[in-house]
Amino acid sequence: MRVRYAETDNMGVVYHANYFVWFEVARTDWMRETGWSYKEMELEGFALPVLEAHCVYRQPARYDDEVDIRVTGSLISELRVEFTYEIVRPSDNMTLSTGRTVHVSIDRAGRPCRLPDRVRAIFGPRVEKDGAR
């Protein structure tokens, strides 16, 4: 994607909160490409609210930069999934930021619940319940 003017501050640098918006865009696209869209998930009675969000800003992204947003997802317990992100400027292959979000699966009543087996399979093998890898 290309950095839009509206995403920058008066110095032409991307405002820090916009990285989390980019993470969300990448996350929803990744889920759609792996076979389970957020829309489908919600229609089936599930949601994935954010429990943790973290971003490390290494180099600034600036107005009109082209950036790639790379995302991977993994199952960290029967209820939790983790997404990791890397924002890279392809023109010089510079990693501008890295990030991580952790989400819990909840049902329509807002109670934690296991994701369906077919969805857990998208995220790969389960790791230890405490999140240790």
Image (spheres, rainbow, N blue to C red):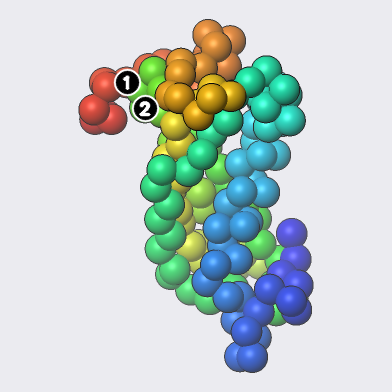
Q: Quadrant of residue 38?
A: top right
Mark 2, residue position: 76
Above or below for 110 versus 22: above
Above or below for 78 versus 56: above
Residue 127 circle label: 1
The single residue placed furthest to the front in the displayed view is 109
Left or right of 115, for residue 44:
right
The C terminus sits in image quarter: top left
Rate crowding at label 1 as few (under 14), some (14 to 19) or many (20 or more) other CA atoms within 10 Å: some
Q: Residue at x 44, y 68 (%)?
A: 57
Q: Is residue 40 visible?
A: yes
Left or right of 60, for residue 101:
left
Estimate the x, y position of residue 94 in percent, counting from the top left: 53, 65
Three-letter amino acid code at the position of disc 2: Ile
The N terminus sits in image quarter: bottom right
Q: Is residue 33 visible?
A: no
Q: Residue at x 35, y 22 (%)?
A: 77
Q: 15 and 112: which one is in front?
A: 112
Left or right of 119, for residue 55:
left
Q: CA distance from mark 1 to mark 2?
A: 6 Å
Above or below for 18 versus 37: below
Rate crowding at label 2 as few (under 14), some (14 to 19) or many (20 or more) other CA atoms within 10 Å: many
Q: 98 and 112: which one is in front?
A: 112
Residue 93 circle label: none
Q: Residue at x 53, y 76 (%)?
A: 60
Q: Quadrant of residue 113?
A: top left
Mark 1 touches mark 2? (CB < 8 Å): yes
